[in-house]
Amino acid sequence: MSTLEPTLPSMPKPSMPKPSMPQPTLLPQAKIPHRRSAGTNLTEAFRIAFMGLFSNKMRSFLTMLGIIIGVFSVIVMLAFGQGAAQATQDAIKKLGTNVLTVIPNSVMRGGVSQGLGSQQSLKLEDAESLKKLSSVRAVAPEVRQSGTVKYANANERTTIMGSTADYFEVRNLPIDKGRIFTTAEVKRRSKVAVIGDSVRDELFGPDVDSIGKTIKVNGQDFKVVGTTRKRGGMMFRNPDDQITIPITTAMQRVFGLQYIASISVQAASEGKMREAEEEVIRHIDQRHRVPSYEESHVRVFNQQDIQESAAAQSGVLTVLLTGIATVSLLVGGIGIMNIMLVSVTERTREIGIRKAIGAKRSDILYQFLIESVALSLVGGLLGVLLAIGTALWLGAPPDKGGMGLPMVLTPEPIVMSFVFSALVGIFFGIYPALKASRLDPIVALRYE
Amino acid sequence: MIRVEKLSKTYTMGNSKVHALRSVSLEIKEGEFVAIMGPSGSGKSTFMNMAGCLDRPTAGEYWLDGLNVSRMNDNQLADVRNQKIGFVFQQFNLLSRTSALRQVELPMLYSGMPQRKERAMAALRAVGLADRHHHTPAELSGGQQQRVAIARSLVNDPVVILADEPTGALDTRTGEEIMAIFQRLNQEGKTVILVTHEWDIALHCRRIIRFKDGNILSDEMVQEPKNAIEELERLPTVDTAELPA
């Protein structure tokens, strides 16, 4: 049992003067000058901290969970928020670039507003005259009603849009097959139609070529000259579920209208949108001889405004999400503080031993601080990895096993939340570490 | 080497004052082997805390290796404990879940000593535990744990070893083995002070100081100290039959 035994018999009696020892002496052979460092060296401190965390795996994991969830939610929420904002901006862009929508203003009848667009005041000539304005590139007057279209036995209710040839360019509706109708056809009030993708699908099925076929629109024969490319819906308008016919045909031969419903105006450039907006209002009011003290005859919706308000909304969303995530990180930090306080109490004796053999207050302080920082950093790292994985999964298209949600991962929230989790570790680790460093070594050594 | 002059320590407990040490003066020279004895409450523990620089006196002076320790701040005291004093405790006071090698390296870690591993191995070899260097305290017997603690106390080459009832938690034979190590250390010139309440143990030392009620009761030299190795030979060698040859 004793490894000491074999070396001892040769030892002489203590009464004799210092003998030469037949075994390695207990004392260091040569004195090496002491070099006192500022504290325990950092790599060693981290090694000790990680060993401590590893030997208490379950507790360490549960402690880190708060930070993991906090970091995870910051990154995923922001990725989703940014993705949603991006999707909104893209959708707005789909409506056409640099587009203003001009609609008649509301009319007051007996002190009651009849609602936007209730005023019957815009004429085809008003739209035509806007083309002369320097800030305007293209103009598309619009009338729109729902109606029925028929081909053979297929019968479909859809939106019938009357406009001019410019409509397709202004509203960013590229042609899939065939052609758009011509300005001449608009002048002649021809019965031609460009049909949307889903209308074509419903009427003809996937295999039949629709170009040149005759369909019935509200009972009248129209020739299909083109189809528009599938684009997907945006808000309340879906250009796929729509047929477009010359506006003259629509007003005079189908609907029997004298006034147009709206005008889509494309500004000369992105920078000229504000200018175009003002010019259009001034021009229409001049044509209509609206006195300056009266309200304008038209209201203009600026695509830029919509974009800006959407951006502002997503900004508010981002602030909100960040706030929630910050709170969860703080809660995670409190969890760390709680466990570190328990740990300090549990390891009171260890602290006493370390102090007895020469640990300074600062050595103990760093040891516990590094442990809490290690907890929060590892938690932060796990949170980041989990969040990136989840964001990639949510963002992947469904045919690749993902959820197809709009997700935009940017480095900023990842770096920020990681740094923040480290700061949480320091902040909430300071109190327990101070408590540990201030323990009286005598009391700590006696602690059971 | 160790010189205390009129050392006093007073604790305040509620309204009453407890005089744990009442103006104690003594001197211990380099190379001495001293036992401190006394019943509980005699002031011996307070004296050892003071000698170990774990506590500061209320009054009086304490000179250790030429330094006036009684005037030092916490950080200076930590340095003194690290460089000049080696502690051995009754309950071994090793860190749990830490290998013997790491335990012995620890004091050097705090002093920033280079070649820690080599030195720690040398210290473990000197107490006969080189082959157990990767074992944690839970995997070692009481005697082996105390030997690790002794290796740890030696590794920074302190001027004095303070042992607080080092055999108190051990059986007679193992205690005798530990005393053999202390005697060998002392023969090699190390100053050793140990606290005990067992005369059997105290008689291994060359000087016995007895405390009572915060004062020194007696301070005597031992004419013929016991030799731990001879004692070991006299003890029945238990369990040898179970050991492989």
Image (tube, coloured by chain):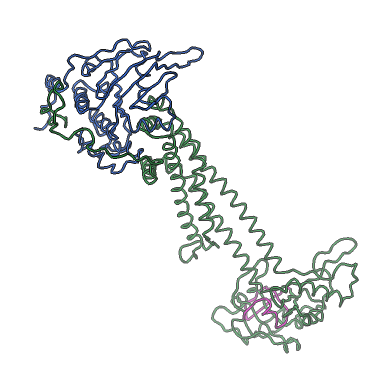
Depth check: B216 or A32 in front?
A: A32
Residue A13 locus on image (x, y percent): 13, 23
The residue located at (54%, 52%) in the rendering is A74
Residue A166 locus on image (x, y percent): 70, 82
For chain A, give the colour: green
Depth check: B235 or B11 in front?
A: B11
Q: Is residue A94 among the parts visible in the rendering?
A: yes
Residue A96 locus on image (x, y percent): 66, 74
* Residue reaching furthest to the left: B245
- A282 relative to B167, above or below: below
Residue A233 locus on image (x, y percent): 63, 69
- A324 relative to A22, above or below: below
Q: Residue A240 magenta-drawn?
A: no
The image quadrant where one finds the C terminus of chain B is top left
- A268 relative to B114, above or below: below
Depth check: A177 or A155 in front?
A: A177
Left or right: residue A151 versus residue A135 is: left
- Specify the quadrant of the image occupied by residue A291: bottom right
Left or right: residue A276 versus residue A62 is: right
- Specify the quadrant of the image occupied by residue B211: top left
Q: Which residues are magenta?
A: A145-174
Q: Residue A161 magenta-drawn?
A: yes
For chain B, give the colour: blue
Q: Is residue A1 among the parts visible in the rendering?
A: no
